[in-house]
């Protein structure tokens, strides 16, 4: 009897074990997998997933940009973020170099395998949702540690907006179902085909938030730095001309000479909505002979200083194409003057994110103790060093003038105005002349110099009667409705810093003249019209 009872107990135990095993075999694990891509993979990227409650899972992408992670028990929507491999994990602050960072939102998960790719298109979708939730940009949303607040409808709206801008390009790239394409959930490989071919011909970055000096909403431009989205943190895209971008990418790679423009709003390429505003870099390629083999890469960006242009990643977008024999035109100084620590609302942020200090009257660099990166000269020298290391020729340009008189107000005669006076006050740690600092740097490092400030001052004073035909002063607000709501840039209140198309062309011609006048640039001058 005892043996029978033992046998029955053992059989019962085996049955329980067998049932448990069967139950375990029948349980589906919920996984998330995808590809981190930028036009090719982002190998070794750190991938983090957070849910609505703050649960977090992390992994790394492999050499092909692919990743997989267990997301059992996590509640949708899931917020996925990726940071490029390397010691730099700063995605947010512009006082130091930012890493390449992107995000994606997955609205729902199901048992089994789920796809969540991370790429520039998904980052803009996440950016739109983040801005809708009152975050400065997607990184602040990621850093909140959870996806709470994001709704399926918000994600759907942002996805439809993206699709409207890229649908034509996706079709031309051979993406199936472009009318319903979702860059997050569509299976893909980072192999330069399909959607990855589209990613090949766009540049991705995150903008700069003036009140905080942090990274903000996602910016996308085509391969020649024409804005696709960038004017505001949400809203419609300017459609990507895929075939033109592919052609220009080929021209960039195969050019005999590339000219890289490092600069600010006076040189930048603008959204169509802002016409007739143009930067001189936007039209500079027109100065060269057809068939010269010259390709201009104008990554100049409105609002950027020499420090922030580097730390914010704008330079890195462009310099990946730099080769031996190229030229780097360095045109900063206007936004480097953002050093008023007592300025209302954004004073400390400007100092942290934008400000560099000019040399003193003896040409000696000035900077706070322990912070040589806040010297304008040293900030400029970083570009000189990197250009020469790549075998390229750096060229210094003083900043173009504002139409300001000696009282530093709109008027004539226009005089040199890129300086901080000891009488200015308002919390400047150091005072001095930014144009002179450009000249100092050119002398110290034996870099060719084009004095664009002097050229634009002479031009402005020679055009006192019609200067508004060159600087931004829009008269026809029916033709250019953007300016009907702007505080400046109108004929009644002209913008004394920025150019319209006619002025951009004139200033581009001045830069070309400066090349002709500089013996060290004779090989480049021979390619001009």
Image (cartoon, rainbow, N blue to C red):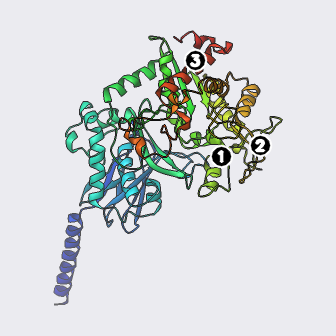
Report which residue position mark 1 lands on.
355
Rounded to the nearest angstrom, the CA distance separating label 2 from label 3 is: 32 Å
Left or right: where 368 falls relative to 201: right
Label 2 sits on a secondary structure element that is loop
Q: CA distance from mark 1 to mark 3?
A: 29 Å
Is 213 displayed left or right of 420 in the figure? left
Q: Which mark is residue 50?
A: none
Q: What residue sits 18% from the left and 75% below the top?
A: 15
Q: Position of residue 164 (x, y in %)?
A: 27, 42
With respect to residue 367, does 272 lie above or below? above
Q: Is residue 388 visible?
A: no
**Element at label 3:** helix
Q: Name the N-terminal-most of marks 2 and 3.
A: 2
Q: Which mark is residue 512?
A: 3
**Residue, disc 2:** 366
Please rate how many residues cluster around mark 1, counting C-alpha atoms within 10 Å: few if below 14, some from 14 to 19, many from 20: many
Residue at 40% across / 42% down in the picture? 482
Would you call the spot at circle 3 few (<14 residues within 10 Å), some (14-19), or many (20 or more)? some
**Residue 511 in picture, x, y percent from top left:** 59, 21
- Closer-to-camera residue (28/344): 344
């Amino acid at each position: 009897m005892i043996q029978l009872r033992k046998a029955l107990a053992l059989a019962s135990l085996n049955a329980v074990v067998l049932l448990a095993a069967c139950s375990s075999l029948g349980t589906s694990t919920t996984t998330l997998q995808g590809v981190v891509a930028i036009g090719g993979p982002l190998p070794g990227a750190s991938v983090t997933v957070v849910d609505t409650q703050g649960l977090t899972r992390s992994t790394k992408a492999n050499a092909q940009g692919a990743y997989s992670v267990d997301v059992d028990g996590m509640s949708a929507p899931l917020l996925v973020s990726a940071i490029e491999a390397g010691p730099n994990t700063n995605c947010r602050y512009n006082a130091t170099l930012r890493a390449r960072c992107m995000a994606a939102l997955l609205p729902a998960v199901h048992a089994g395998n789920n796809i969540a790719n991370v790429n520039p298109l998904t980052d803009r979708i996440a950016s739109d949702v983040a801005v809708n939730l009152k975050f400065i940009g997607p990184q602040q949303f990621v850093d909140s540690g959870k996806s709470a607040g994001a709704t399926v409808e918000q994600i759907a709206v942002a996805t439809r907006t993206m699709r409207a801008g890229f649908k034509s390009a996706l079709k031309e790239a051979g993406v199936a179902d472009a009318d319903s394409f979702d860059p997050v959930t569509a299976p893909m490989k980072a192999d330069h085909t399909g959607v990855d071919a589209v990613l090949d011909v766009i540049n991705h970055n995150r903008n700069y938030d003036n009140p905080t000096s942090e990274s903000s909403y996602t910016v996308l431009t085509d391969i020649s730095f024409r804005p696709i989205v960038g004017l505001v943190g949400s809203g419609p895209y300017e459609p990507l001309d895929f075939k033109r971008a592919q052609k220009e990418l080929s021209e960039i790679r195969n050019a005999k000479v590339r000219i890289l423009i490092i600069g600010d709003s006076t040189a930048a390429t603008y959204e169509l909505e802002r016409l007739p505003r143009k930067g001189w870099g936007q039209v500079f390629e027109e100065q060269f002979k057809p068939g010269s083999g010259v390709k201009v890469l104008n990554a100049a960006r409105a609002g950027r200083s020499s420090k922030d242009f580097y730390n914010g990643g704008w330079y890195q977008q462009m310099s990946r194409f730099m080769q031996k024999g190229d030229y780097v035109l360095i045109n900063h100084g206007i936004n480097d003057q953002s050093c008023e620590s007592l300025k209302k609302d954004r004073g400390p942020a400007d100092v942290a994110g934008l400000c560099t200090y000019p040399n003193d009257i003896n040409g000696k660099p000035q900077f706070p103790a322990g912070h040589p990166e806040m010297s304008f000269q040293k900030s400029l020298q970083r570009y000189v060093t990197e250009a020469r290391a790549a075998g390229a020729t750096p060229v210094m340009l003083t900043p173009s003038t504002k139409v300001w008189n000696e009282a530093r107000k709109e008027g004539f005669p226009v005089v040199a105005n890129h300086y901080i006076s000891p009488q200015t006050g308002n919390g400047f740690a150091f005072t001095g002349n930014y144009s002179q600092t450009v000249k100092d740097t050119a002398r110290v490092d034996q870099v060719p110099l084009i004095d664009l400030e002097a050229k634009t001052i002479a031009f402005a004073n020679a055009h006192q009667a019609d200067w508004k035909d060159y600087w931004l002063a829009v008269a026809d607000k029916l033709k250019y409705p953007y300016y009907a709501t702007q505080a400046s840039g109108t004929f009644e209140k002209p913008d004394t810093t920025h150019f319209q198309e006619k002025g951009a062309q004139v200033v581009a011609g001045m830069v070309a003249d400066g090349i002709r006048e500089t013996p060290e640039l004779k090989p480049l001058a021979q390619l001009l019209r």
